[in-house]
Image (cartoon, rainbow, N blue to C red):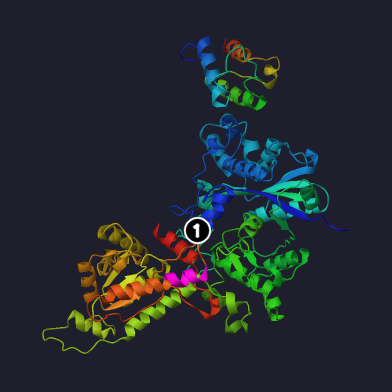
Amino acid sequence: MATKTTPQDIETTVMEALAKFGADPDVLTREATLEEVDVDSLDLVELTQVVEDEYDIDLENADFKKVKTVGDVIDLVVERVG
Amino acid sequence: MTLRDVVITGVGAVTPLGVGARALHERWTAGACGIRDGEAPCADFTVTDHLTIKEARRADRSTQLAITAGDEALAEAGWTDELPYDSELIGCVLGTGIGGIETLESNHDSLRDTGPGAVSALAVPLMMSNAGSAALSLRHGLRGPVFSVVSACAAGSHAIGTALRMIQHGEAEAMVTGGAEAPLTPLSRAAFGKMNALSESGVSRPFDARRDGFVMGEGAGVLVLENGDSARARGARILGTLRGYGSTGDAHLITAPHKEGRGGARAMTIAIGDAGLTPADVDYINAHGTSTQLNDRAETLALKLAFAQARLGGSRGADPGVVDQVGDRAPARRRRRGGGRRDDPRVARPDRTADDRLGGARRGPRPRLRARHGTTAGDVQRQAAGRAVQQLRLRRPQRHAVPAGGVTAQAHRRRKGDMSERGPVLLTGATGFLGMEVLGRLVEQTDRDVIALVRAPDDGAAQDRLDAVIAMLLPPGGRPRRARVRGLAADLEQPDLGLSPIARDRLAGSIGAVVHCSASISFVRRQRPYRRGARDDGRRCVRRAASGACAPPVEEYFPALMRDARWGKQALPRWAAERQALQHVA
């Protein structure tokens, strides 16, 4: 990565992607569960594609097993980007 | 085993004529045309009006159309709040020719341009041919048999037939069925273009001698079918009964039907027998009519094969009263909506040119089907126009001395054998079905000037409308001819054609002939007295206006509504005129 990626950048990327997938922007917060914002496994697969392209990381389906909230997703990506 | 009867309780459609089965029916019977620039997209369809962002992202366009048509059909059946039967007894079978080709193409673009990582994780569920039936199953919780059938242009009909059998045999209590296609993509265009199947003129005219291929379109049609007893028991509104089904294969070419139409005829014969009917019982045929040379020719023969039998058997009721060529998407729906109504579009019968080529002397006696139904609206139009122009040309001019000094235009015209000294031809209905043909012939085959009455705000607008017609009628470079045609803003329904007394007198004093091709006919009010009145009013009106203050210059009169032996007492249908005019002028 040519420029430094901040956790805030990653949060913005994830939030924008989920909104684009059709999640309701009004309830889309870090605390919201994936169920509440209607994000399912197919959305997570698509999200994986977005963040892999953006940050040059590898994510597996298994990585999402413990993910419950939008914040968990963001933290997972932040952790991988390191 | 007694088969259960199957009824239609809901219909839905998204078509180039609008969103909704009602929009389709109303605009279609009004003669509207969904073709724009040589293609027929569902231009009124905005996906976010019907689906959430997520739903739209999870569906190829073909599936989006199917979902929207399905919503309408289920709503009409009264299924919106709750399914009327155990969800495991309700299935969905849709038909498609290609499936999600838009998804396939866009993902292939990504693969080629960026690499495998760029291919969408949703590519497979979106592009698979059964995506439509799967989407309807998911959306409405249908847990019976759910799959799609793939058989090119016949897919929608095959799906309906398959659903019929499932209910008849007790595999399902109800089925959601129909077809969807959204192939307006670069690859499909190129592929169909390579087959020489697409119309170069961009006009779809099935069974017409001038047909030159089909016009690509998109759309979806969905029906709700139910076990008749169950539907009646729950008090459902029964829209129609699906009585029979037949399906055959030609084992011929992959790109063409068998030239004698035997496979098609056999399918129709099987379906009629399956329904427990005879050809004589059939009032309405929803033909495939692709507007390609190969299909329409074979289909004409197939229709004759399937229906001529009954005619030869002496049954008077054996006419396949209405042949519709719009497509195969939802024949049952059309039968339900259109069949038996006074206003349903009486569409092209097998056209005479094709008929002559196929069923002429070389083939022995023509099937009797032709006696009343072997002619198209276009055919009547051409014959009528030919007669009208011929009559004008037969009136030879009085001899005039040719001035010394060379061949004058007058003499030149005389050599060509038409009359022109007597003033221009006053033409009504020039932008209409018959009038256009007459105008073309007047310009091409005679040297007469033409004044065309056109309903328009002013003469300039009238001229614009005429120019549009002439541009379509004449090959490029027809400017000198075009200059002989002058548009005059007028309204036949107004006294003196809506002209000022001075303009009226000037017109009446100058014209040499009147060719009256217009009629004010309401498509909705088809009662015979109204039609006769409208025609005669137009006739009187033109006579009166044309005669004006001087001697009647009316040389020719040609009524717009022709009586033709083959049409019985029926006049040339207005819808045909409107449809043709729309296709050509719009």
Q: Main secondary structure of the magenta part?
A: helix
Q: Amino acid at mark 1?
A: Ala
Q: Which residue is mark 1?
A: B30
Does residue B294 appear to the left or right of B37 in the view shown?
right
Which portion, as a residue range, is magenta? B527-534
Say if residue A55 shows up in the picture.
Answer: no
In the image shown, does B232 or B107 lie closer to the viewer? Answer: B232
Rate crowding at label 1 as few (under 14), some (14 to 19) or many (20 or more) other CA atoms within 10 Å. Answer: many
A3 is higher (above) or lower (below) than B253: above
Residue B344 horizontal/vertical position (percent): 57, 62
Give the residue drawn at x 53%, y 38%.
B109
Say if residue A21 shows up in the picture.
Answer: yes
Does residue B354 appear to the left or right of B8 in the view shown?
left
In the image shown, does A16 or B542 lie closer to the viewer? Answer: B542
Name the chain under label 1: B
Give the residue drawn at x 37%, y 74%.
B539
Quarter-wise, where is residue B87 in the image? Answer: top right
Q: Secondary structure at mark 1?
A: loop
Residue A11 horizontal/vertical position (percent): 54, 14
In the image shown, does B20 or B531 lie closer to the viewer? Answer: B531
Q: On the rendered image, what quadrant is the C terminus of chain A found in?
A: top right
Count of marks, rendered view: 1
Residue situated furthest right in the rendering: B1
B348 is higher (above) or lower (below) than B180: below
Residue B249 horizontal/vertical position (percent): 71, 62
**Was residue B412 drawn as part of the magenta stretch in this picture?**
no
Does residue B142 appear to the left or right of A17 in the view shown?
right
Does residue B327 appear to the left or right of B41 in the view shown?
right
In the image shown, does B76 or B299 lie closer to the viewer? Answer: B76
Quarter-wise, where is residue B449 in the image? Answer: bottom left
B196 is higher (above) or lower (below) than B516: above
